[in-house]
């Protein structure tokens, strides 16, 4: 069993991005600029946005964070999005989710210009991704593909079982694995006997959000297991009072695997890199 070490691979990719930014600058081209909008003070969201700012600094991107009170109106938020859409200095925009209840998330994500939609949530980008056209990819699936490529995990003709069908992970992940010549099965909360499918899998991507869901009896010897779960579970011994638990019963599943991602340190850092890669891609795709 070998660990798919997202911490290590993300460091290496960040160095490559940093080099590319230096080259862009030396050619007199634009420095990639990521903007993030944060509404309210949800703890996890504040942590994510701060991490994105730090990542941008590390690779030499410009970064702007706009922070607003939770009572910001939907109309005012849409205006802010439009301002950024029309600001040629900003290449990528994310509006951190979840948004307060009175704001329609769908309306907001669809107002972000698809040319700046580095989350890859806009229907235009979803469509382009499904067609295999070059566009922004949702950060987690993008990061997972990069991680599998780094370790030379064979995908041609392999059976990949994706557990979960969210718009952010499950659905795009299945499209990307199909493009990598896997036979893809998508299991979800209504699937009867998920185990019947996972036992046939060469690659399992668990993105269902139930801690410890994938147990050793569901996995055959030699499987590649990618764990997308990051549920906070209470842990009095941790400084924060919680620890992150994945969708995989790591301790018992890992000995059966050829490769497996740890939680934390597997998919999480690769998601962060996915966003940086999209922001870099924004320059070649849309910067004049
Ligand atoms: N909240 C949790 N994950 C994400 C993400 O990938 N993008 C945005 N914008 N918000 C999130």
Image (spheres, grey):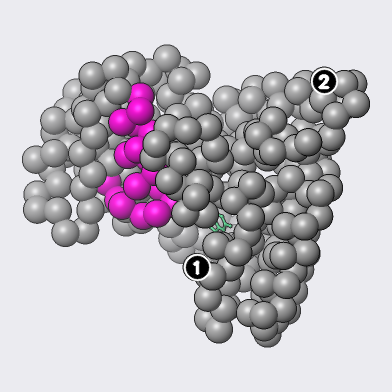
Residue placed under numbered mark 1 in the picture = 106
Q: Kindly check if marks 1 and 2 are in contact, taking CB atoms under 8 A apart as contact.
A: no
Q: Is residue 67 above or below residue 178?
A: below
* Residue 176 part of the magenta-drawn span: yes
Left or right: where does residue 277 sit relative to residue 83? left
Question: Quick one: label 2, few (<14), some, or many (20+) residues within 10 Å?
Answer: few
Q: Is residue 104 above or below residue 242?
A: below
* Callout 1: SS: helix
Looking at the image, can residue 127 be seen? yes
Left or right: where does residue 57 sit relative to residue 170? right
- At 60% from the left edge and 64% from the top edge, which residue is drawn? 111
* Residue 180 figure quarter: top left
Q: Which residues are magenta?
A: 163-180
Picture coordinates of residue 115, whole percent (x, y): 64, 47
23 or 52: nearer the viewer: 23
* Callout 2: SS: helix
Looking at the image, can residue 258 be seen? no
Which part of the image, by quadrant, shows the C terminus?
Answer: top right
Picture coordinates of residue 63, whole percent (x, y): 80, 48
Residue placed under numbered mark 2 in the picture = 23
* Residue 200 figure quarter: top left
179 or 261: nearer the viewer: 179
Question: Quick one: label 1, few (<14), some, or many (20+) residues within 10 Å?
Answer: few
| Earlier residue among tags 1 and 2 | 2
């Amino acid at each position: 069993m070998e660990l798919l070490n997202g911490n290590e691979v993300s460091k290496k990719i960040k160095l490559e991005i940093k080099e590319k930014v230096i080259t862009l600058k030396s050619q007199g081209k634009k420095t990639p600029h990521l903007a993030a909008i944060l509404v309210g003070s949800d703890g996890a969201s504040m942590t994510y946005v701060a991490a994105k700012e730090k990542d941008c600094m590390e690779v030499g991107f410009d970064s702007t964070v706009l922070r607003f009170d939770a009572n910001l109106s939907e109309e005012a938020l849409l205006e802010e999005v439009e301002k950024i859409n029309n600001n040629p200095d900003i290449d990528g925009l994310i509006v951190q989710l979840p948004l307060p209840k009175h704001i329609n998330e769908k309306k907001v994500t669809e107002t972000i210009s698809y040319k700046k939609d580095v989350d890859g949530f806009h229907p235009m980008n979803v469509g382009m991704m499904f067609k295999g056209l070059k566009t922004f990819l949702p950060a987690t699936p993008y990061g997972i593909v990069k991680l599998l490529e780094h370790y030379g995990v064979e995908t041609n003709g392999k059976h990949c079982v994706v557990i979960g069908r969210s718009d952010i992970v499950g659905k795009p992940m299945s499209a990307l694995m199909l493009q990598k010549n896997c036979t893809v099965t998508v299991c979800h909360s209504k699937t009867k006997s998920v185990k019947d499918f996972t036992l046939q899998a060469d690659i399992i991507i668990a993105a269902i959000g139930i801690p410890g869901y994938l147990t050793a009896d569901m996995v055959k010897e030699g499987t590649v297991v990618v764990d997308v779960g990051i549920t906070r579970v209470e842990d009095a011994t941790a400084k924060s009072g919680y620890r992150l638990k994945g969708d995989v019963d790591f301790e018992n599943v890992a000995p059966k695997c050829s490769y497996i991602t740890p939680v934390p340190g597997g998919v999480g850092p690769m998601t962060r890199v996915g966003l940086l890669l999209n922001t870099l891609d924004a320059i070649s795709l849309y910067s004049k």
